[in-house]
Image: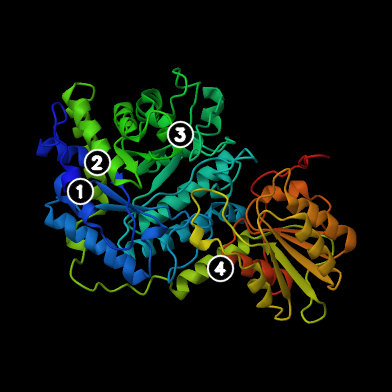
C-alpha cells in the first residue's frame, strides 16, 4: 500500500480521522469485474463514499451482483455505518451500462417522442428494479438537459426533447419511477448542457444566455424536480458567464452556481455531485486533484474521479492539504458528509443486504414483464416522419437491400460494447431474404459507388443513418440512391436532425437509438406488423449541406 501512504509536512495522510472524512467525498471507478486490491485499500483506509461502475465492470447479471456484494462486504468489514452508494449511468437508449441478461429500455428522446410521461415512469420503475436487483442503488439519471441545439455533440437523444415543459414532465416521471423502485436518482447536468456545441469530455463548453433565459428554459426542469424531491444533482463542466463572472470557471467549480444558484436560490438541500473530474474540461484546466478542492469549496458534496487510482489518491491528498492550510473548512466537509449520510439513510440499510457467498439474481432482471413495458414504449416512440405512400412494404414481394454503418458510437459517454449495429438483422426477422451491406463510418467514394451499383438489383433500399453532419458522406450516398430509385427508406438510428439534410427522401423514420428492440419495432412498422405512433420531440429544419 506504499502508494497510499503519502508522507511529508503539511500533507497529513496519517491523520486517519480526517483522511476518512476526505475519502467519503469521493466517487471512484476502477477496471474489471472483480474488486481490485487497491480499491479494497481505499475502502478500508479512506472510507471511499461511492463507487461508479462502467461497461468495463459489467459482466453477466450474476457477475454484477457478485461484484456489488463483494464491495458491500468490504465496506461492512471496514466499519461503514451505512452501505456504499454504488452508481451507474443507466440512462437507457444510447447510454446504458447493463448488458447481457438485462432488459433494454428506451432512452430519453424515444420516451419524449411518445408524448406520454407514464412511459417514463414505468420505464423508471422497471429500470430501478433491475438495478436494485443487481446491487446498484444509485442511478446517474435522468438527464434534464433541454436539447435546443441541433449541433449538441454530447446530449442530443439523451434529452427528452427541446421543450423545457416536456423535459420537466418526463424527467419528473422518470425520477419518481426510479425512486418508487428504491433507487437514488441524479438530475443532470446542472445548470443545463443542452445548448452547447462542444463535448465537455473534450473541452470546456460556454453557454452565454442571460439568467432570465436560463430560468425560463434550462433551469425549469431542475426547479420542478427539486420541488418534487430530487435526491442528487450533477453539475456540468460548462462555463456560464451570466452567473460566474470569473472567466473560464465551469459550473462544477463555481460557488456562484453551486451555492448561490442551486443551494440558496433554488433551495436544493440534497447531494450535489460533480461529473467526472477526469474529463478534459477539468483535467486540462485546473487539473483533477486541485479541481476536487475547488469543487468542494464551491459547495459540491461528491467529487467523481472515475478512472485513475493516482488521481483518486491525489485528490484526497489535496483535500487534506486544503483543510490544513485553511483553504477548506472541516465544517464544510462535515456538512457534505451529513447530506451524503441523509441520502444513504433514505435508501440504504445493512439489514436489506445479503452479504453471503453466491448471491442469487432475482427473476425481475430481464423479465418478460419488463420487456413488455419497453416494447409498449418503443411502439409509442418510434416515429414515421414522412411516408410517400411506400409503407407498409409487403414481405416476399420485393428484393430488399439494407445499408447501414458498421459502428454506432459518436459520444465519449456511449459504451462501445453496444456499437455493433443490427438494423439488417431486425429487417431479416420480417424479410429473411433481405441482403445487408455495412459500410465503414468514414464511407469512401468507392464504397458509395459500390452501394449505388449494388442497389440497382433491388426494388427497395433501406438505409440506416447515424448523426449526419454537413460534410457527411451519408448525404451523398442517399442523394445518389434517390436519383436511381423511388423506394428509398431512411431510418435515423440516433439523431432526429438527420432529416434536415435529407428533405427529398421518400420515407424517413426515427428510432432515436440503435438498440435492437427499437430497430425491430421500426422494421415491424416497415412491413405493417407494428403500429408506431411517435412524434418528433424536437423541431427539424432544413440544414445547409457543405459545398451546396
Asked which quadrant contains residue 508, the reply is: bottom right
Q: Which residue is mark 1?
A: 42
Give residue 281's mark.
Answer: 3
Which comes sooner in the sequence, label 2 or label 1?
Answer: 1
In the rendered structure, which disc, 2 or 3, sits on the residue that comes first in sequence?
A: 3
Q: Secondary structure at mark 3?
A: helix
**In front: 25, or 147?**
25
Contact (CB < 8 A) between labels 2 and 1?
A: yes
Residue at label 2? 313
**Would you name the residue on which mark 4 appears?**
375
The residue that appears at 19% across and 31% down in the rendered structure is 320
Work out which quarter of the rendered image holds the C terminus and state it.
top right
Q: Dot 2 surroundings within 10 Å: few (below 14), some, or many (20 or more)?
A: many
* Nearest to viewer (mark 2 / mark 4): 2
- Asked whether residue 190 appears in the rendered view, the answer is no
Q: CA distance from mark 2 to mark 1?
A: 8 Å
Tag 2 near tag 4, CB within 8 Å: no
- Tell me where residue 498 appears, x and y as whole percent: 71, 50
Amino acid at each position: 500500500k506504499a502508494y497510499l501512504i503519502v508522507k511529508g509536512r503539511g500533507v497529513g495522510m496519517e491523520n486517519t480521522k480526517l483522511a476518512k472524512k476526505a475519502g467519503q467525498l469521493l466517487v471512484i471507478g476502477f477496471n474489471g469485474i472483480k474488486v481490485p486490491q487497491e480499491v479494497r485499500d481505499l475502502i478500508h483506509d479512506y472510507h471511499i463514499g461511492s463507487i461508479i461502475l462502467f461497461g468495463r465492470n459489467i459482466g453477466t447479471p450474476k457477475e454484477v451482483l457478485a461484484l456489488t456484494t463483494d464491495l458491500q462486504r468490504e465496506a461492512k468489514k471496514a466499519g461503514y455505518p451505512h452501505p456504499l452508494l454504488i452508481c451507474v449511468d443507466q440512462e437507457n437508449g444510447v447510454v446504458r451500462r447493463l448488458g447481457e441478461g438485462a432488459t433494454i429500455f428506451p432512452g430519453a428522446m424515444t420516451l419524449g417522442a411518445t408524448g406520454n410521461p407514464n412511459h417514463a415512469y414505468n420505464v423508471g420503475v422497471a429500470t430501478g428494479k433491475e438495478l436494485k436487483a443487481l446491487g446498484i442503488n444509485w442511478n446517474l439519471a435522468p438527464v434534464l438537459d433541454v436539447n435546443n441545439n441541433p449541433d449538441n455533440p454530447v446530449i442530443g437523444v439523451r434529452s427528452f426533447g427541446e421543450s423545457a415543459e416536456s423535459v420537466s414532465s418526463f424527467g419528473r416521471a422518470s425520477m419518481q419511477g426510479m425512486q418508487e423502485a428504491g433507487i437514488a436518482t441524479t438530475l443532470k447536468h446542472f445548470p443545463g448542457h443542452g445548448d452547447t456545441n462542444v463535448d465537455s469530455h473534450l473541452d470546456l463548453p460556454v453557454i452565454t444566455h442571460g439568467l432570465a433565459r436560463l430560468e425560463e428554459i434550462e433551469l425549469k426542469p431542475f426547479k420542478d424536480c427539486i420541488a418534487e424531491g430530487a435526491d442528487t444533482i450533477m453539475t456540468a463542466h460548462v462555463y456560464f458567464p451570466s452567473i460566474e463572472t470569473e472567466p473560464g470557471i465551469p459550473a462544477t467549480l463555481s460557488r456562484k452556481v453551486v451555492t448561490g444558484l442551486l443551494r440558496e436560490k433554488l433551495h436544493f438541500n440534497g447531494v450535489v455531485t460533480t461529473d467526472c473530474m477526469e474529463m478534459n474540461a477539468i483535467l486540462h484546466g485546473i487539473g483533477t486533484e486541485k479541481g476536487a478542492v475547488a469543487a468542494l469549496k464551491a459547495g459540491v458534496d461528491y467529487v467523481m474521479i472515475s478512472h485513475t487510482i493516482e488521481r483518486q489518491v491525489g485528490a484526497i491528498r489535496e483535500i487534506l492539504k486544503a483543510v490544513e492550510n485553511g483553504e477548506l473548512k472541516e465544517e464544510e466537509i462535515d456538512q457534505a458528509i451529513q447530506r451524503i449520510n441523509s441520502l444513504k439513510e433514505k435508501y440504504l440499510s445493512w439489514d436489506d443486504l445479503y452479504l453471503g457467498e453466491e448471491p442469487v439474481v432475482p427473476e425481475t432482471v430481464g423479465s418478460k414483464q419488463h420487456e413488455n413495458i419497453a416494447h409498449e414504449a418503443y411502439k409509442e416512440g418510434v416515429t414515421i416522419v414522412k411516408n410517400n405512400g411506400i409503407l407498409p412494404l409487403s414481405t416476399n414481394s420485393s428484393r430488399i437491400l439494407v445499408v447501414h454503418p458498421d459502428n454506432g458510437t459518436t459520444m465519449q459517454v456511449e459504451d462501445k460494447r453496444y456499437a455493433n449495429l443490427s438494423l439488417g438483422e431486425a429487417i431479416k426477422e420480417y424479410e429473411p431474404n433481405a441482403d445487408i451491406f455495412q459500410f465503414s463510418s468514414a464511407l469512401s467514394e468507392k464504397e458509395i459507388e459500390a452501394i449505388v451499383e449494388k442497389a440497382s438489383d433491388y426494388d427497395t433500399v433501406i438505409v440506416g443513418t447515424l448523426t449526419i453532419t454537413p460534410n457527411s458522406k451519408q448525404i451523398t450516398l442517399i442523394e445518389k440512391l434517390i436519383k436511381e430509385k423511388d423506394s428509398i427508406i431512411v431510418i435515423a438510428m440516433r439523431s432526429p436532425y438527420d432529416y434536415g439534410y435529407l428533405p427529398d427522401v421518400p420515407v424517413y423514420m426515427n428510432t432515436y437509438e440503435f438498440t435492437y428492440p427499437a430497430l425491430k419495432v421500426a422494421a415491424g412498422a416497415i412491413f405493417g406488423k407494428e403500429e408506431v405512433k411517435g412524434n418528433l420531440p424536437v423541431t427539424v429544419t432544413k440544414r445547409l449541406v457543405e459545398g451546396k
